[in-house]
Image (spheres, helix red, strand yellow):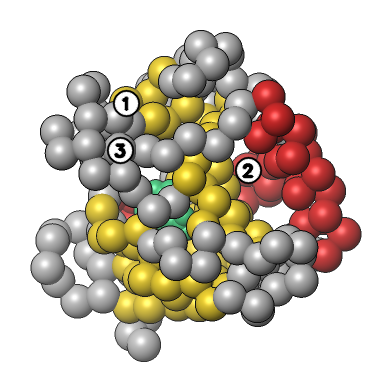
Amino acid sequence: MTALPDGVAFHPGFIDTAGQSVLLSELRGIVKAAPLFTPEMPRTGKPMSVQMTNCGALGWVTDKARGYRYQPDHPMTGKPWPAIPVSLLAIWNAVAGFPAPPEACLVNFYRPDAKMGLHQDRDEQEFGAPVVSVSLGDDARFRIGGTEKGGQTASLILRSGDVLVFGGASRLAWHGIDRVYPGTSMLLKDGGRINLTLRRVTRA
Ligand code: MD3
Ligand code: FE
């Protein structure tokens, strides 16, 4: 494994097991109010293997007809997204180094066979703010490259409680999840992995 790109800060084990349980119970409430949906690739409509929901004033969604976007309401229920829990805002305040709060928290749920291909996150208007990622549940192999497609990549195992900050040059880095390792965490009774990404969407 080569070094992580400039602008990445890795905080392994940032959230202890008690904190992970608190976050999980908050997420159960969020998923009750804003059920997981299956995102579709723009134009092709191919379903992604990851299921998603959001909390915050804005949520990231995608479907065949309208593609990638942020919107204030859930695509199936039409209801506003639930608020970002205070515990997640505290994590942002501790690690982001950015003066304005996040507006979106994308919740990704991975069953054992789910993965996420290499992509850039560029649907936001504020690239001066970092993206803060929180991993819960089973381990996963995360891959990150540079800002140009097709360059060298590094890989890193992400474990439950790990926090990563992607700022500076890494904010537009290509990245994805190669695979999840089933049975590596006891946090989720039925296994799987959850990733939370806190994002500033509009210009601060
Ligand atoms: C680097 N999620 O939601 S987290 C995503 O584990 C996403 O679910 C993966 O990629 C997951 O968009 C990876 C790490 C991550 C998240 C966002 C980034 C790395 C990033 C945004 C910019 C640069
Ligand atoms: Fe991403």
Where disc 2 sits, the SS reads helix
Spatial CA span between label 1 and label 2: 22 Å
Mark 3 and mark 1 lie on one chain; the one further toward the N terminus is 3
Can residue 99 be seen?
A: no
- The vertical placement of 64 against 120, above or below, is above
- The vertical placement of 13 against 195, above or below, is below
Disc 1 marks which residue?
Answer: 69
Considering every residue shown, the one lying at the far bottom of the view is 1
Mark 1 and mark 2 lie on one chain; the one further toward the N terminus is 1
**Neighbour class for label 1 at 10 Å: few (<14), some, many (≥20)?**
few
Residue type (three-letter) at the residue carrying disc 2: Trp
Give the number of the disc on residue 126: none
Spatial CA span between label 2 and label 3: 29 Å
Spatial CA span between label 3 and label 1: 12 Å
Residue type (three-letter) at the residue carrying disc 3: Glu
Disc 2 marks which residue?
Answer: 92
- Asked whether, in this view, residue 67 is left or right of residue 71, the answer is left
Mark nearer the viewer, 2 or 3: 3
- The vertical placement of 82 against 196, above or below, is above
- Asked whether, in this view, residue 22 is left or right of residue 79, the answer is right
**Quadrant occupied by the N terminus:** bottom left
- Asked whether, in this view, residue 190 is left or right of residue 140, the answer is right
Q: Position of residue 164 (x, y in %)?
A: 53, 60
Mark nearer the viewer, 3 or 1: 3
**Quadrant occupied by the C terminus:** top left
Give the number of the disc on residue 40: 3
Task: Name the residue rendered at 65%, 60% in the picture.
Answer: 136
Where disc 1 sits, the SS reads strand
